Image: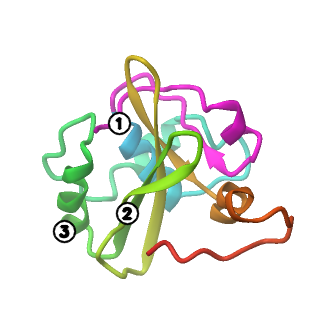
Amino acid sequence: MRGSSYIKLPKAIKDKKAMINLENEDQQCFKWCVTRALNPVDKNSERITELLREESKIPNWGDMEYPVKLREIDKFEKLNPRISINVFGYEGKVSPLRISKLQREITINLLLIHDERETHYCLIKNMSRLLRSQVTKHTESAVFCLR
C-alpha cells in the first residue's frame, strides 16, 4: 500500500474532526502530512502553502519515492532519528497498519485511506477523538496504547 493524491475523508471520519486532510495535487501526501505534523498551524491546516513547502525542506527525505509505500517509512525513520511514524487504516473502523518499533521524541500518526483508484495519507491530530467511539459511548477524552 502507498499514499498518493488527495481523497476526501469518509463522512464518519470527517465528522470526528480528528484529522488534517492535506489537499495535495501531487503524489506526496506523506511528505505534506509529516511536514504539517512538525509545523502545526491554527487555520487552514489542510492547505499546502508556500511556507509549508519551505518547511518541508527540513526533514531528510533522502531518495524517497512518491507515493510512499508503507515499507519505505523505515527508510524515513532511519534518516530522521527524532521522528517515528505510525500508520492506521480505515475499513469501517480504524486499525493499525504499521506501528513504529522506535520510541522517539516525535511520534506522528497517519491514517491511510483509499477509494477505488488511489490511497492517501492523512494526519491524525487527535487520536482520542478518532478512536473513542470504537471502544466506548462516553464522551470524555481517552488515552490509547497504540501497541
Circle 2 residue: 85
Res 138 quadrant in image: bottom right
Mark 1 burial class by Cα count in 10 Å: few <14, some 14-19, many 20+: many
Res 101 quadrant in image: bottom left
N-term mark: 1 or 2? 1
- Label 3 SS: helix
Residue drawn where x is 51% and y is 57% of the image: 37
Circle 3 residue: 78
N-term mark: 3 or 2? 3
In this rendering, is residue 102 above or below 61? Answer: below
Residue 45 drawn in magenta = no
| Camera sees residue 17 | yes
Tell me the kind of residue under disc 2.
Ile
Residue 14 drawn in magenta = yes
Circle 1 residue: 3
Q: Is residue 108 left or right of residue 75?
A: right
- Label 2 SS: strand
Farthest left residue in view: 63
Tell me the kind of residue under disc 1.
Gly
Q: Most prominent secondary structure in the magenta stretch? A: loop
**Magenta segment range?**
1-27
